Image (cartoon, grey):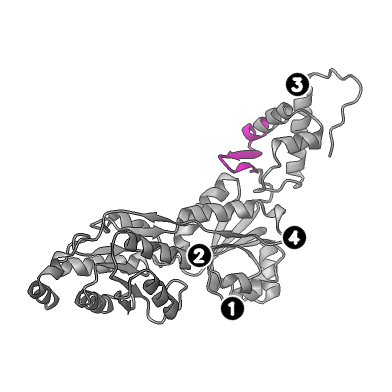
Amino acid sequence: MFFVMKGNKSMAPVLKKELVYKMLRDDIVSGRFAAGCKLPGGLDLAKRYQVAHMTVRHAVKRLAADGYVSFVNGAGTFVTYKSDQAIYLILTSNLSDVSLPGNYVIPGIQRTMSQAGAKTKLCLRDFIMEMTPDDFNAMIRRENIQGIFLMESYFHGSERELTLLKTVDIPVVMPHAVESDKTICPFSMIVADFEKAFAEALLYLRKLGHTRVATIDGIGWSFRGYPRENFEKLLKENGMERSVILESELDMEGLRDCVDRLLKARQSAVLCYSDFYAIRVIQILRERGIRIPEDISVMGFCGYPGGEYTVPKLSTLDLCYDTIGVMAAELMLRHQEWFGKSRIILESPGFLQIRESTKRYVTPTIYKDVNTTKERLSV
């Protein structure tokens, strides 16, 4: 719709503001600008209605005051008017498992969508697994679901949820995908480059002077994207050949064995698969009278919020889960730009969160006296 000035060119500015306000409001109420969507920029709206930018600004401010739109700092202006309110589904597998990264991404999604006037609902994947594609699509229409956040990753291609999601004609965003998902899932996604991030954490310890860095990984897993031979090559390239590679489930018995083995191998630092591993390693080392970081530096990976409450506070490679949630929500909110045209693939952020559990290498006291070391290992 265009606003064409006719007749008296000196029409009062207040009338222009009133007309633009009504036109914008009608576009919102009619659904041309749907609930949760981002309004075009002020200059685009000025061109659309053929008025000055300032006139549009006044009209949008009034729309905000009347509850039709909401301003989100750094993101734009979003429609908050709710007739039949649009719902955005957050599809997840387990809300009670504290080790699942998606559970730390979800709050950022919920907060950002709410600020934009869009409503989110949580749904466990188990609830849809027995649905037929027809039933799933009927549910999507009945609940007025306008988009889905898929909180899972590491797909193989045959998963039931993928089969169902490929049949719906609404945008799907994967907030915490991995590299392999790019070739399997046809959705927009935010991809974590675990390989690069894990190397960054390892090389941070190398810059501190640690050349014997034990790595504790899950049994049968890759080292955050590295096949074992590639990870060994990375160690060799950085003068860390005497580092040991260990594997354990996330249980105290297996991790106690890892700690004993890394002490026997005279390692000065340990890089763990996740913060959950690192927190338990710290507990075991302290049980053995080992000081952290004076005797051994401990590094986590992922940025679990509890890491800053450990004693000592845990250094980690923070994957910025809350920021990922915000990015995913903003990607969904501007789906008109890409849905049905192409998919968007973004890289998630990450940074070294340096706290108290790591320090520059100094020959650990526990390795200066062999007898003392043996006594501690026999505890």
- Mark 4 or mark 3, whichever is nearer to me: 4
Label 3 CA crowd tier, 10 Å (few <14, some 14–19, many 20+): few
Q: Earlier in the sequence, mark 2 or mark 1?
A: 1
Image position, residue 41 (x, y; %) = 69, 39
Element class at badge 3 = helix
Please name the amino acid that badge 3 sits on: Val
Query: Looking at the rendering, in which quadrant would you find the C terminus?
Result: bottom left
Q: Nearer the viewer, mark 2 or mark 4?
A: 2
- Sequence-wise, the earlier of marks 3 and 1 is 3
Residue at the spot of label 1:
159
Q: Is residue 272 left or right of residue 117?
A: left
The structure residue drawn at horizontal position 66% and vertical position 30%, both measured from the top left corner, is 62
Q: Secondary structure at mark 1?
A: loop
Amino acid beneath label 4:
Lys
**Residue at the (24%, 61%) spot, across then down:** 361
> In x, y percent, where is residue 34?
71, 48
Residue 193, numbered circle: 2
The residue carrying pointer 2 sits among few (fewer than 14), some (14 to 19) or many (20 or more) residues within 10 Å by Cα, namely some
Mark positioned earlier in the residue sequence (4 or 3): 3
Q: CA distance from mark 2 to mark 4?
A: 25 Å
Chain part drawn in magenta = 62-80
| Earlier sequence position, callout 4 versus callout 1 | 1
Return the residue nearer the eye: 331 or 195.
195
The total number of labels drawn is 4
Res. 341 mark: 4
Kindly check if marks 2 and 4 are in contact, taking CB atoms under 8 A apart as contact.
Answer: no
